[in-house]
Image (cartoon, helix red, strand yellow):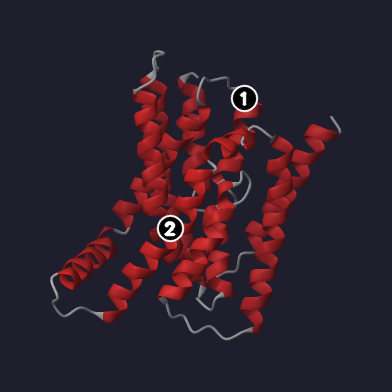
Amino acid sequence: MDFTQAIILGVVQGITEFLPISSSGHLVLVQNLLQIESTDTFAFDAVLHLASIMAVVIYFRKDIWILIQALLRKLGRLPVNEKDITMVYALLIGTIPGAFIGYILEEKMSILFSNVLLVASLLFANAWFFIFAEWHYFNNHQTNEITIKKGFQIGLFQIAALLPGVSRSGATIAGGMILGLSRTEASRFSFLLAIPIILGVGIKKSLDLIGQTEDVIWGPIMVGATIAFIVAIIVIHYFLKFISKHTLWPFIWYTILMSLFVGYLYLVL
């Protein structure tokens, strides 16, 4: 992998990680289009995810600090804001399903990431899930209240993101909308929920890269990661502004068109 390819992948990761269009699916497609051959592209993808999740940590640093303080005060048996500690519990329990299933199926999932047609199919299915979420959102009242139960249920939606082509942010945002959260609150919870699982996977895969017996060319990896971090911060900021005023429909149409294009490209041509 050269520097140009790493920069392209970094930009793709930074843009798609927090938009509901599947970063893993886009990385698979771009790697195939660029004919990138690497001994461990799955690990490289994880390093890019690690860089982009650090963008979330930086962007939501004030929220994270408030939640850490709430947890420490609770452990110290001091008075806490019940809304804050409920958010902490919801995030903790919401992380469990994806982390548990991901740990069990890690090797099988890495095999699926090479199947471009599967990516296209899941992108298409993803779009229909968003359509259902928007329909449900329009026809039901939003309580906009985070509970521990909702945190766990949104965590179940996060399991689907183990499949390439299924957007993690999209699945959890749409799941939150179905459970009664506003688009903005569902997006905020989705970003915070991403931190533990993506951070864990990113660190593990980074250590795997460091421990490889083969020589790892770190230059392109670090450049790609830096680009992913910068782009991700910009995307998070503008996506939250966008989703507070608009629906998921632009992403629905994009995902449908992308899936059809990929299907045509690999089946017809």
- On the question of residue 109 being in view, the answer is yes
Tag 1 secondary structure: loop
Give the labeled residue for mark 1.
34
Q: Is 214 situated above or below 41?
A: above
For the residue carrying disc 2, how many other residues have a C-alpha within 10 Å: few (<14), some (14-19), or many (20+)?
some
Residue 139 rendering spot, x and y as whole percentages: 66, 83
Residue 20 appears in the picture as rendered:
no
**Residue at (16% x, 71% y) in the render:** 73
User: Residue 23 location in percent, x, y?
Assistant: 55, 44
Say which residue appears at 55% left-offset and 55% top-offset.
159
Q: Which mark, by number, is residue 244? A: none
Amino acid identity at mark 2: Ile
| C-alpha gap between disc 1 and disc 2 | 35 Å
Relative to residue 131, is residue 211 drawn left or right?
A: left
Residue 228 location, quadrant: top left
Q: Which residue is the site of mark 2?
A: 96
Q: Amino acid at mark 1?
A: Leu
Residue 191 in the figure: left or right of residue 122? left
Identify which residue, 222 or 50, lies in the foreground: 50
